């Protein structure tokens, strides 16, 4: 159930009432309901994979306790290895088997060998990339003594299956969410209304900006005959779509969690205002970046520390290769990751990776130099997103090639709709720019605007969202 | 908490009310689906000839030219699964049914409405015919399926702009295909043929079964089934893949061979239809529909004398 | 070497690597207390410390530090 569908809304309204009106008596009841709700939510997509989720959760839970009870470091390491191996193997199997098979077959085809291998008929379990990373971070943190293992099964299982962040994150660490699960949640008006405001902003980004950009980007990407500047426009709209869609979804997830009394990890911090790629990755998909930093980059950079900058470069490229693969089972994602890792190399060599030169929050406009940096970073990201969106490296190559074909008639694809969407994009960025010091632009609106003004804002955005929700038929034929 | 819930209700209430009003307004706009469904509700028991199918038959068969009492329950992109659902809905009431006319055209055996670009139309069958082909357990509403901006536009052009929305005659024949520009018609043929040529035949066996089910349903009423391949202009027919055409013809022939109450008329090869009978390369206009319907009527008359 | 001596040298290293004269480390200081200290330059700090004291840490050791005090203790055991 995607968040802005009727089944989810009905589910959540019912859940909300039972959670706050019935289960508020006891912590155990609250957590049991949360777990049951999360499992119902998960089963809605595919009840068979619920067993996989439960199995992985149970295994990790048991191993976590086992690691703590083990006396010898060797035994601790063995239990950690078991947990990591099983969870990673499951993820690899469902997500990457066909990728490995088809890549292997393609490789052999170069040598004219045909092993006659078939792709497996696999379905990707919902959220497996996300919950596997929650499980892995738990095991590592327990082994490294960063946290104590969770003894309450319901709490642990709720942490893993937490439904607001199951579909698309954020990826919470144990120490963020578990302490909140171990205390009863008391309804807080300010937190709940802040959550509603964040959901409103997230919905705006997703429905009004992202979905409209998606339509334009698809029209451009799907037509292999297009060439010239229109392809730049297509890449631009896709770049906006990626941000509005993903950050919008994260805002909704965080807002929904707030409605239930939870503060979960922030996932985006206005990344397109970044002045270099290091700043960008500190602000884009923050929960994934910190996960990869703590569990991939740091161990690698520690191991390679004797070869100085070269070690850091290798570590960052490897980390981003993992990130690329995490995003999907296609060489396009691998190349995307590789490019981002390479983008860091000049920063590492110039020693600028750690320099944070953020624009002060009270400054009205960026300086020319700052704006140039922002634009440069945006273009770097936009370039890689073409590869990210393409269905194959060959198609990405064709896209770039066609971009430079300037002769011939320009395709008449631009409509007045583009102007309207641009208006929304500019509006979104203007609002975010002016509110870049806040967690989300509508934070603390109750202090900044009087009630009438606030409700005008809520209604205006809600009306926009409603206008754009729903499907537009592709062919109208003037017949409905 | 009380403050939160109250604020939320106060906020959402106007939208809910407006939404319900909009839904009522939308569903009251006359449309072909509603018209046909209501007609069948009232007159199914009186019908002697029922035509089901997609746009080729919607525009090509006008029951006004039948001697028997008939109705055209076709619509654009309506595929066999929906035809069967409609037949099943009125099965118990078709007391006087003598003939079911089922078009079998070049793409018919291979498509399903929900897969194609027109898949959004399924909601019209759910709302206006009361069918539930996808087994939804939540009811369907215009406001919850279609983009709100579009819905508001529809309300505006009907209630304020007074643009007529009904495009069928009282007996269900499609009235809005009356192009007179032949060049456009000729050009459209090739693209249409290409669009209708399939590589994936996954629905062939289930479509064949659906046709057999229609034959059986007719038999239970002691009625007969006329499978017909609708005429088309040669700017369409010359681009058709012979393999797909042969498969279509063979499939129907094999069904008819095993069904004493079924017959097949292939009008695609009928040379009496000229360029003046068509709106575009594969749809008939008013003149062509009259011609086609009179031909069908004489086939029905001859057949009913023998059976 | 005494712990506070080690702490002073470590502080100088931080000021130098992070390019910030205002850094004042205590035993309880963690990465979240120092704005420029994040995972991306954490390793450079570690390398600078190892070079300065002419010691070498084990990977597990580095990962186990929760604050400056624990880093200082690790340094002390190696001197």
Image (cartoon, coloured by chain):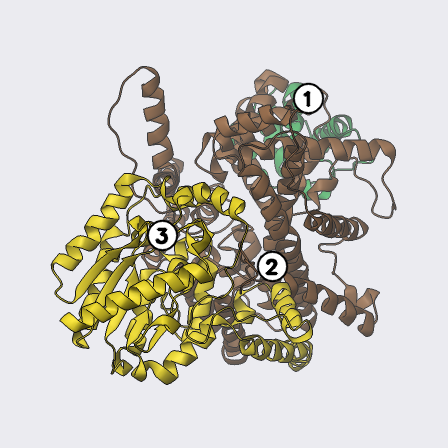
Chain colours: A brown, B yellow, C green
Which residue is identified by label 1?
A346
B121 and A277: which is toward the camera: B121
Q: Which mark is residue A62?
A: 3
Which residue is identified by label 2?
A252
Write the residue at 57% across / 61% down.
A478
Q: Which-is-in-front pick, marks 1 and 2?
A: 2
Residues flagged by tags 3 and 2 on a common chain: yes
Q: Earlier in the sequence, mark 1 or mark 2?
A: 2
Quadrant in the picture for residue B71? bottom left
Q: Which element carries disc 2, helix, strand or loop? A: helix
Q: Position of residue C35 (x, y in %)?
A: 74, 40
Q: Earlier in the sequence, mark 3 or mark 2?
A: 3
Q: Which element carries disc 1, helix, strand or loop? A: helix
Residues flagged by tags 3 and 1 on a common chain: yes
A263 and B137: which is toward the camera: B137
Q: Is residue A59 above or below residue C27?
A: below
Quick check: marks 3 and 2 in contact, CB under 8 Å? no
Host chain of mark 3: A
Q: Is residue C71 above or below residue B127?
A: above
**Could one spot residue A470 in this view of the protein?**
yes
Quick check: marks 1 and 2 in contact, CB under 8 Å? no
Q: Marks 3/1: CA distance?
A: 45 Å
Q: Marks 1/2: CA distance?
A: 36 Å
């Amino acid at each position: 159930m995607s968040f802005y569908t009727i089944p989810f809304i009905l589910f959540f309204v019912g859940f909300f009432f039972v959670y706050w009106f019935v289960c508020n008596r006891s912590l155990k009841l609250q957590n049991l309901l949360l777990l049951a709700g999360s499992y119902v939510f998960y089963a809605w997509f595919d009840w068979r994979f619920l067993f996989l989720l439960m199995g992985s959760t149970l295994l990790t839970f048991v191993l976590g306790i086992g690691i703590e009870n083990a006396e010898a470091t060797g035994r601790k390491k063995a239990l950690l290895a078991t947990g990591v191996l099983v969870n990673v193997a499951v993820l690899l199997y469902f997500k990457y088997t066909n990728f490995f098979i088809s890549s292997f077959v393609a490789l052999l085809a170069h040598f004219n060998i045909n092993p006659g291998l078939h792709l497996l008929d696999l379905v990707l379990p919902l959220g497996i990339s996300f919950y596997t990373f929650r499980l892995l971070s738990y095991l590592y943190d327990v082994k490294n003594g960063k946290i104590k293992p969770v003894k309450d099964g319901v709490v642990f299982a709720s942490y893993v299956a937490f439904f607001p962040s199951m579909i698309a994150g954020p990826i919470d660490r144990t120490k963020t969410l578990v302490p909140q699960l171990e205390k009863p949640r008391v309804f807080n008006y300010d937190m709940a209304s802040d959550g509603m405001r964040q959901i409103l902003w997230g919905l705006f980004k997703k429905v009004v900006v992202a979905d409209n950009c998606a339509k334009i980007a698809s029209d451009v990407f799907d037509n292999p005959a297009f060439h010239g500047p229109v392809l730049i426009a297509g890449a631009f709209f896709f770049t906006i779509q990626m941000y509005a869609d993903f950050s919008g979804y994260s805002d909704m997830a965080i807002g929904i969690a707030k409605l239930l009394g939870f503060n979960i990890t922030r996932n985006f911090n206005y990344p397109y205002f970044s002045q270099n790629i290091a700043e960008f990755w500190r602000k884009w998909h923050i929960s994934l970046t910190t996960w990869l930093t703590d569990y991939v980059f740091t161990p690698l950079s520690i191991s390679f520390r004797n070869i100085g900058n070269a070690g850091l470069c290798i570590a960052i490229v490897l980390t981003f290769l993992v990130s690329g693969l995490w995003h999907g089972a296609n060489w396009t994602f691998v190349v995307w990751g590789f490019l981002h890792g390479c983008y860091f190399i000049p920063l590492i060599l110039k020693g600028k990776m750690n320099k944070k030169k953020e624009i002060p929050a009270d400054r009205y406009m960026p300086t020319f130099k700052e704006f140039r940096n922002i634009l440069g970073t945006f273009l770097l990201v936009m370039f890689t997103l073409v590869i990210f969106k393409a269905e194959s490296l060959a198609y990405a190559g064709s896209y770039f090639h066609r971009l430079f074909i300037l002769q011939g008639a320009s395709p008449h694809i631009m409509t007045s709709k583009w102007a309207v969407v641009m208006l929304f994009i500019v509006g979104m960025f203007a609002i975010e720019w002016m509110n870049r010091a806040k967690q989300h632009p509508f934070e603390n609106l109750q202090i900044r605007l009087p009630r009438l003004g606030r409700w005008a804002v809520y209604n205006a955005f809600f009306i926009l969202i409603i206008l754009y929700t729903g499907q537009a038929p592709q062919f109208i034929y003037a017949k409905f | 908490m009380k403050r939160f819930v109250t604020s939320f209700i106060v906020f959402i209430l106007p939208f809910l009310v407006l939404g319900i009003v909009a839904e009522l307004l939308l569903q009251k706009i006359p449309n072909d689906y509603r018209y046909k469904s209501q007609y069948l509700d009232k007159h199914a028991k009186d019908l002697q000839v029922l035509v089901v199918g997609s746009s080729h038959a919607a525009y090509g068969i006008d029951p006004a030219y039948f001697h028997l009492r008939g109705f055209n329950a076709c619509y654009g992109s309506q595929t066999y699964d929906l035809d069967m659902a409609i037949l099943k809905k009125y099965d118990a009431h078709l007391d006087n049914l003598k003939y079911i006319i089922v078009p079998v055209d070049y793409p018919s055996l291979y498509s399903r409405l929900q897969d194609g670009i027109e898949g959004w139309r399924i909601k019209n069958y759910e709302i206006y015919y009361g069918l539930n082909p996808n087994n939804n357990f939540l009811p369907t509403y215009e406001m919850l399926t279609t983009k709100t901006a579009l819905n508001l536009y529809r309300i505006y052009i009907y209630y304020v702009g007074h643009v007529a929305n009904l495009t069928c005659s009282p007996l269900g024949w499609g009235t809005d295909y009356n192009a007179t520009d032949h060049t456009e018609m000729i050009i459209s043929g090739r693209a249409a043929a290409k669009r209708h040529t399939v590589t994936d035949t996954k629905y062939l066996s289930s479509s064949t079964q659906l046709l057999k089910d229609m034959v059986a349903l007719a038999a239970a009423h002691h009625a007969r089934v006329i499978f017909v391949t609708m005429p088309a202009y040669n700017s369409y027919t010359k681009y058709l893949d012979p393999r797909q055409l042969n498969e279509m013809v063979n499939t129907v022939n094999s069904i008819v061979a095993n069904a004493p109450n079924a017959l097949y008329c292939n009008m695609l090869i009928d040379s009496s239809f000229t360029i003046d009978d068509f709106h575009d390369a594969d749809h008939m206009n008013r003149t062509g529909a009259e011609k086609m319907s009179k031909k069908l009527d004489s086939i029905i008359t001859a057949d009913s004398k023998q059976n | 070497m005494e712990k506070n001596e080690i702490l002073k040298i470590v502080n100088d290293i931080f000021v130098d690597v992070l390019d910030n004269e205002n850094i004042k480390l205590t035993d309880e200081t963690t990465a979240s207390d120092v704005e420029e200290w994040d995972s991306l330059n954490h390793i450079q700090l570690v390398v600078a410390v190892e070079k300065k004291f002419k010691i070498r840490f084990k990977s597990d050791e580095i990962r186990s530090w929760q604050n400056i005090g624990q880093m200082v203790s690790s340094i002390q055991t190696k001197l």
